[in-house]
Amino acid sequence: MSDGEFDYVVVGSGAGGGPLAANLASAGFTVLLLEAGGDPCATNETGRFMYQVPIFHAFSTEYPPCSWNYYVRHYTDDAQQAKDSKIVRTEGRDYIWYPRAGTLGGCTAHNAMITVVPQDDDWNYIANLTGDSTWSANNMRQYFERLENCHYVPAPGSIKGDIDKAFSSIGGLFHGKGNGQDQTDGHGFSGWLGTFEADPKLVLKDHELLQLLLDGVQNALREHLGPVGIGIESRFDPNDSRFRESSPEGLVFTPMSVANGKRNGPREFVLRIQQQFPGKLTILQNALASRVFFEGTQAIGVEFIEQAHLFRADPQATADGSTLQRSRARAKREVILAAGAFNTPQLLMLSGIGPREQLAKFGIAEVVNLPGVGANLQDRYEVAVISCFARDFELINHATFSPPDPQPDPYMQQWLKEGSGLYTTNGVLIGMILRSSKELKDPDLYILGIPGTFRGYQPGYSKLLEYHHNRFTWAILKARTNNSGRVELNSAQPWDPPTVNFQYFGDGGRVNDPDLDAVVTGVQFVREMNHRLADQGLIINEETPGSIYSTPDQVQQFVRDEAWGHHASCSCRIGADSDAMSVLDSRLRVRGTKGLRVVDASVFPKIPGYFIVSAIYMVSEKANEIIQEDA
């Protein structure tokens, strides 16, 4: 591959780069897609199960052939960081384990597959910031319809779809009042990403226990929303475009990127396009990009090292990169970086684009002084409330939640034979969307009910999920947070992971923090709901946070100490031309350069929506359109 030439060189096969490479190739361009990891799904049966079986998503984050283990800081202050029960001691300091994926498909190969579009304001904010109306929600929604292949809403033209449309026109659709603006209600039915909504009965087979749990949830929602709240008695679809203006609260579907019982995503898309257009899309695995090279400020290609398990976040890393040959691939049109919120700013800085002091510190020749590279790092805040139920959940009794060893359990047998059953889900039983404050225009809390134990990410967590058969977790996620951390170089070597500090809650110094107050409100809501369930004899006690955290101040301290996230983003942000800290213009071009763009989670000026992968997919579709326009 040394000195190969392509129209486009794309670095990273995840949610941004994978679909973009496939779309450009199918449009007739020659594309090289560089992926630092391999494809364990294609090389062994265990890898296939870890990728394809939706219920194994937690286990896949700890599967060595495709895992990258980052160790990040939530706080600069050592004393505050040490309060987190999930800390990992390494190199003399306390860190938090942050699982990433080094494999074809990137982190879409191990995520929980939740596919929920952002709210309109997330897109309109970018449009207003840049003055580029193509970022408005009215325009951006088309990209989701373009990429989705929805399997849980009847397609237009089907018998059920026509019946539902008729009922909708008279206001009788079961999941809320429509405005008749769109026959497909914001869904697509012919895109590359299959979506599916799991039946809660698959997750919790004890129907009596499920009904008692739902009754408790509905009573709590009635008190929070009043008797007319949407989604109290039934669930609404958060991706239904008819709810864009009302932004309702209540019980929700939690759509997943699952098709025919299996995880699907960029991996399937790029492999399919490679088969269809073998002369157009070249996928090079185990190729770690080391830098972009330039003629002046014109990006003309990417330097890389072909070696499996080279990046030192890889638990199987053994190679010494300094002894390995570096190859080059030239881009006749553009280089596109899609390596994620950690590795894209790292690669830019290794290439001479970033804060001047960072480049000088490691002796890197400056191409463009861009102080915003690596700044503005954002994530969600999530915490868990875990309770002990009075009796075991029936689903646990015969499920091992692991590949055949040596024989498959009954649920695995059902998945193997029929592609159905519990293992086609991600384990989420129920979802709720709420406002932490009535004054908010849009809801900002997404609360997930999960049978099992999940306190956040720490080594070994996947084995603890179902260790106790009577634990239930409410995971509380705060959308649109205000944290602002930084990614910095750790060395000038591309195989060394960068230094990552999220600086939670203003690095612990923010007074009257609205994010902190919102998460506390979520904890209080869940606790009130659990009190009702305890009155019915369902719950014995609260395990996390536990009774030692009872006052509002104590709950605040619990959130400060124990919050986590898994949606790193915003470290190469889009911004206005007048903003010295913006890295990209509204067409995703790296400022001060030519022929260089970024298309991944790092591009957002503020973290969008509840679950970031859908927003990245939409940006990737938009990038395909504007790149072809410029071509």
Image: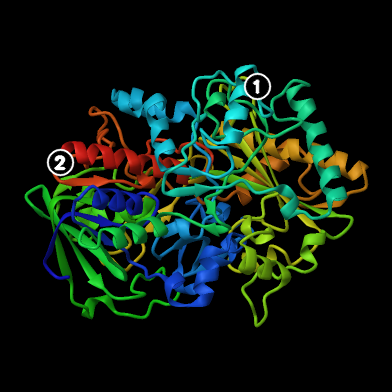
x and y percentages locating residue 460 in the rendered image: 61, 69
**501 horizontally vs 540: left or right:** left
- Per the image, label 2 sits on a secondary structure element best described as loop
Q: Please name the residue that numbered disc 1 is placed on.
A: 438
Residue at image point 28% right, 53% down: 21
Who comes first in sequence, dot 1 or dot 2?
1
Tell me how the rendering is colored.
rainbow
Front residue of 462 and 257 = 257
View extreme (front): residue: 159
Residue 177: image location, x then y, percent:
63, 21
Up/down of 32 relative to 75, above or below: below
Identity, as a three-letter code, of the amino acid under mark 2: Ala
Relative depth, front residue between 619 and 196:
196
Q: Residue at x 40, y 32 (%)?
A: 142
Badge 1 crowding class, 10 Å Cα cut-off, few under 14, some 14 to 19, many 20 or more, is: few
- Say which quadrant the C terminus sits in: top left
Residue furthest toward the left?
Answer: 295
Image coordinates of residue 616 in percent, x first then y, are 40, 44
Q: Secondary structure at mark 1?
A: loop
The label shown at residue 631 is 2
Q: Quadrant of the N terminus?
A: bottom left
Image location (x, y in percent) of residue 65: 45, 74
Task: Mark yes or no: residue 392 visible.
Answer: yes
Total count of labels: 2
Crowdedness near tag 2: few (<14), some (14–19) or many (≥20) residues, C-alpha within 10 Å:
few
- The nearer-to-camera label among 1 and 2 is 2
Tell me the CA gap for discs 1 and 2: 47 Å
